[in-house]
Image (cartoon, coloured by chain):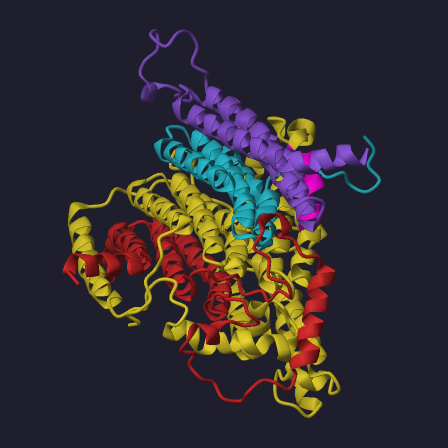
Chain colours: A purple, B yellow, C cyan, D red
Amino acid sequence: MSELLHMLDILRPYVAGIALLSGGVIVLIGASGVLRLPDFYTRLHAAGVTDTLGTLLVLLGLILLSGFTLLSGKLALVGLFLLLTSPAATHAVANAAHKAGLKPRLGTVQSQPPLDASGDPS
Amino acid sequence: MNGEFLTPIDAFTVIDLIFMSMLVVVGIAIVRLKDLFAVVMLSGVYSLVSAAWFVSLDAVDVAFTEAAVGAGISTVLMLGAMLLTARQAAPTKPARHWVALIVVCATGAALLYATVDMPSFGDPLSAPNAYIGLEYLKRTGPETGVPNVVSAVLASYRGYDTFGETTVILTAGLGVVLILGLGGPAIKRKKTSAAKAKAAKIDQSKILGAHHVVLRVVSKMMIPVIIIYGAYVQFHGDFGPGGGFQAGLIIASAIILYALIFGIDAAKEAVPPSLVRLGAALGVLIYGGVGVINLLLGGNFLEYNILNPTHPSHGQELGIMFVEIGVLVTVASVMLIIFYGFTSRQPDISDKDW
Amino acid sequence: MIFATALMLMAAMMLMLVRLLRGPELYDRVLAVNSFGTKTILFLCVFAFLIGRSDAVDIALLYALMNFIATIAILKFFRYRALDVALSRTRRRGETR
Amino acid sequence: MSSGIEFWQYLVGHFNYIVVIILMMTGLYIVISTGNLVKKLVGLGVFQTAVFQLYITMGKVTGGQPPILEGVHESAAGEAATTVAEHGEAAAAAASHGEQAVQATVSIAKTMDEVLVGGVLYSNPLPHVLILTAIVVGVATLAVGLALVVRIRESYGTIEEDELQEANYQHAKGALS
C-alpha cells in the first residue's frame, strides 16, 4: 500500500504536467475556434465547452503540483466558482442573443454570404 | 541614472512585453471604436490586463484593487451613465484628429526625452527603490508585526494620507449625491408615466419570475460567497493582499449584483439608502475616531503604539484593523451611494435615438 | 512546463482579444470578454506557480467570483435598457408559490 | 562601446517607460480628439491607468518578491503555500526579536546586501500604497464625472462637445438680442 502511494507520488508531477499541457492545448483550441468559426452560436459552443474542460485540467494539474495545502484549496475554489459562473454567463449570452432574434447561419459555407454580412439581428 | 545596472531579459520580460502589447492594442482599439458599448467592454478588458500585469510586477495589492474595480463597479457605472446619455459616439472630425495628433506627438517626444534620466527597469539600487521604500520594508516587521508591508504603510506610516483619501472618496460620493440626488426610498419612488408603461411592457414579456432561473440560482449561490470573500480580504489583509479598500469594493459589487438580478427595489429593501448614507460618514468617523482616541490616550493623532503601551506592535495591529474597518465602511457605502444615484434617474431617451 | 502552459494561455488571451476587436455582434464581444476573463484567471493561477508565491491565486479567486457581474450587466443593459428592472423575482414575506 | 549597444541597453532598461508613454498618449489622444463626453472619460481612465503603471514599473525590482514579508522564503513552485498560522508565527518572531533594532536615520542603500530585508529581495511597497488608494479615488471621481455628463445630457439633450458649444452659442445670442 505504501509502495503504491510512493509510486503515485513519483508519478504526480508527470500527471500534473500532462494535465497542465493538455489543458493549455484545449484552451488554445477553443480560442482558435472562437476566432475562426463562422457565426456567434458556433463560437459560443467553442468557447463554452472548451473553457470548462481546459479550466478543470489546468487547475487539476496545479492542484497536483501543490499537494494538499491551503493553496490547493484555493485553486479548488477557483475551479468550483468557474464551474458555477462560466456556464451561467454563457447561458446568459446565448439566451440574450436568441431573444434578440440573432439567427444562426445554416447550410454550407459556399451558400452563405461572407463572414461580415452574417448575423444581422432582425 | 544608475549606469551599472542592466535589466536582464528573461521569461518574465517576455510576459511583461506580451501584456504591454495587449494594452497598446486595446488602447488603440478604444480610440477607433465608436460603439460606446464596445468601448466600455474594452475599458473593462484594459483594466483586466493591467491587473494581470500588476501581478507580474509584484504589485499584488494594486492588482487586487484594480481587479475589484474593473470586474464590476466601473463597468456598471459606465453602462449606467451610457443608459442615460447615448450609445454611439460621433465620428472624430479631421481637424480635431490632426490637432490631437500633433499635441500627442509633441508631448510624447518630450516625455521620451525625459526617460533617459530615469532609472533602469528593475534596478534594486535606484533612488526610489533604495531609499524610503526600503526603509518601510525594514521597519514594518519589527515595528508593526504586520507581514503585508503595503497594509502597514497604508494604514500606519501613511495613515494621514489614507485618512485624506478616504475623505476624498466620501466627498466624491457627496458630489454624486448633489448632482444626481439621493436615490430616494425603496418603494415610494416617483415614476414617470413613460417608465410605468415600460415596466408594464416588461412585465408582459415574462422577464420576471422563473424566466432567468439559471441566473437567479447562480447569483443566489454567489452573492453570499462574494460577501464572505470580502470579509476574508478585509481581515486577511494584514497577511496577504487585501485590505479595507478592496473589501469595500468587493462587498459593494455583491450588492450591485443583487440589484442587477433581483431589481433595484429589492436591493434597496435589503440595503436601505439611508443606511448607506449613514455608513459613508460613519467610516470616516471610525477612522478619525481612532486618531482621536490616540490623542486622548496621550499620543499623537493616529499613533497606534499608544493603544497597547506594553506591546507597541500589538497596538499597531489593533489600530490598523480599526482604521481598515473605517475604510471598508466608507468605500462600500460610497460605491452604493453612487450606484443608487445613477439608478434613481429615468432615461428620457426614445427608443429610436438610443 | 508551467511556463509553456502560461504562454499557451496568453496566446489564447490574444486570440480572444482579436475576436473582441473584430466583433461583429455585441454578443460576440461579450462572449470574448467573458472567455478572456476565464483565461486570465487561469493565467494568474499558473503565474502564481511560476513565481512561487500564492498571492496571485487570491486575485484569480476574486475574478472567478466577480467576472460574470460585468457580463450580466452588459447583457441586461443591452436587452432591457434599464437598471432598475428585475431579472428575477424575490419572494416576499408570507408569499407562497 | 558603440552607440548601437548603448541604444540597445537604453531600450532594454527603459522599455517600460516607452510603453507607458505610448499608453498615456493614447489616453490623451482620446481626450482631445473625441467630442463624446463618455468616451473622453474612458480616455481619462486610460491615461490614469498609464500613470499607475508608471509608478508600479518604477517600484519593480528584478528578482524581487511582492512586498509581503514571509518568514520562510519559498522558491519551489510546489511549496508555494504558507498557512495563516505560519504567517502569524513569522510575524510574532519578527516582532519579538527586533523591536529595538531599528535605527532612527534613513540612508540610501548602495550595495546589493543593503537592499535585502531578512535575506530576501522585495519590490518597493511605496508606489503600491500610493496607487492602491489612487485607484479607488479614481473610480469615485469617475463617478462624479459621469454624473455631470448625465446632468449635461438632461439639460442639453446631447453629450457631443460641438453640439454643446453650438447650444451655448445660440443661447448667448438669444440672450443678447
- Horizontal and vertical percent position of residue D100: 64, 86
- Horizontal and vertical percent position of residue B320: 65, 73
Which quadrant, please, contains the C terminus of chain B?
A: top left
> Extreme front residue here?
A3
- Horizontal and vertical percent position of residue C25: 40, 28
> Does residue B159 sit above or below D151 in this rendering?
below
Identify the main secondary structure in magenta.
helix
- Camera-side residue of D70 and C62: D70
Q: Is residue A5 left or right of residue B250?
A: right
Disc tally is 0
- Horizontal and vertical percent position of residue B104: 21, 57
Q: Is residue D170 visible?
A: yes
Going 61% across and 52% down the picture, which residue do you hit? Answer: D80
Q: Is residue C96 left or right of residue A49?
A: right
Going 65% across and 39% down the picture, which residue do you hit? Answer: A64
Q: Quadrant of residue B33?
A: top left
Which quadrant, please, contains the N terminus of chain B?
A: bottom left
> Does residue B188 sit above or below A77 in this rendering?
below
- Camera-side residue of D167 and C70: C70
Q: Is residue B245 left or right of residue B128?
A: right
Verify whether residue A62 appears in magenta: no
> Extreme bottom residue here?
B298
Magenta-highlighted residues: B215-226
Q: Quadrant of residue B32?
A: top left
- Camera-side residue of B184 and A39: A39
Q: Is residue C82 visible?
A: no
- Camera-side residue of B335 and B107: B107
> Does residue B37 sit above or below D47 in this rendering?
above
Q: Is residue A26 left or right of residue D36?
A: right
Going 69% across and 31% down the picture, which residue do you hit? Answer: B209
